[in-house]
Image (spheres, rainbow, N blue to C red):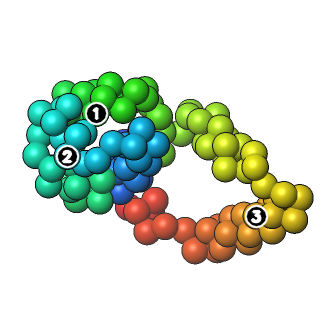
Amino acid sequence: MSKEKKDHVDYCLLGQRVRRARMKLNLTQEVLAEKVGVSIPTISHIETGTNKVSLELFVSIANALNVTPDELIMDSVPKLTAFYMKDIQEELKDCSPAEYKILTETLASMKAALRRYPRRNEDE
């Protein structure tokens, strides 16, 4: 009997969110590394999703970036859909009507494609 993998952290998406939050604060990887007590390559590996993050480091990074931990791992916690909506709204807030229409149509196409070709790790 194979055990279904329900608790999966997508470290690439986590890294993208760390990078986005760092850049929003205009911090370099060096400054973030100093704030949390790790090397610059460690931050780089986290942002590219090649390193797993200890809970202690994860909390330190969230605090240094002034974000909540759930904002960084929301991709791995299905109940955090409201945060996704917040991100989408943030991206759309300065769009023109024409841009909004194009983005809406693009999103619908992407959603259809995702449903036709599910990600491999969802089946594992």
Quick one: 57 or 33, which is closer to the camera? 33
> Of callouts 3 and 2, which one flags the residue occurring earlier in the amino acid sequence?
2
* Left or right: where 102 falls relative to 38: right
Q: Closer to the camera: disc 2 or disc 1?
A: 2
User: Disc 3 on helix, strand or loop?
Assistant: helix
Residue 74 location, x and y as percent?
A: 48, 39
Residue 54 location, x and y as percent?
A: 18, 36
User: Disc 2 on helix, strand or loop?
Assistant: helix
Residue 49 location, x and y as percent?
A: 29, 56
> Of callouts 1 and 3, which one flags the residue occurring earlier in the amino acid sequence?
1
Instruction: Answer yes or no: is residue 101 visible.
Output: no
Numbered label attached to residue 61: 1
Numbered marks: total: 3
Instruction: Answer yes or no: is residue 56 visible.
Output: yes
Check disc 3 and report the residue beneath it. 103
CA gap between label 3 and label 2 equals: 35 Å
Check disc 2 and report the residue beneath it. 30
Tell me which corner region of the image, top left, top right, bottom left or bottom right, holds residue 87.
top right
Is 67 located above or below residue 44 in the figure? Answer: above
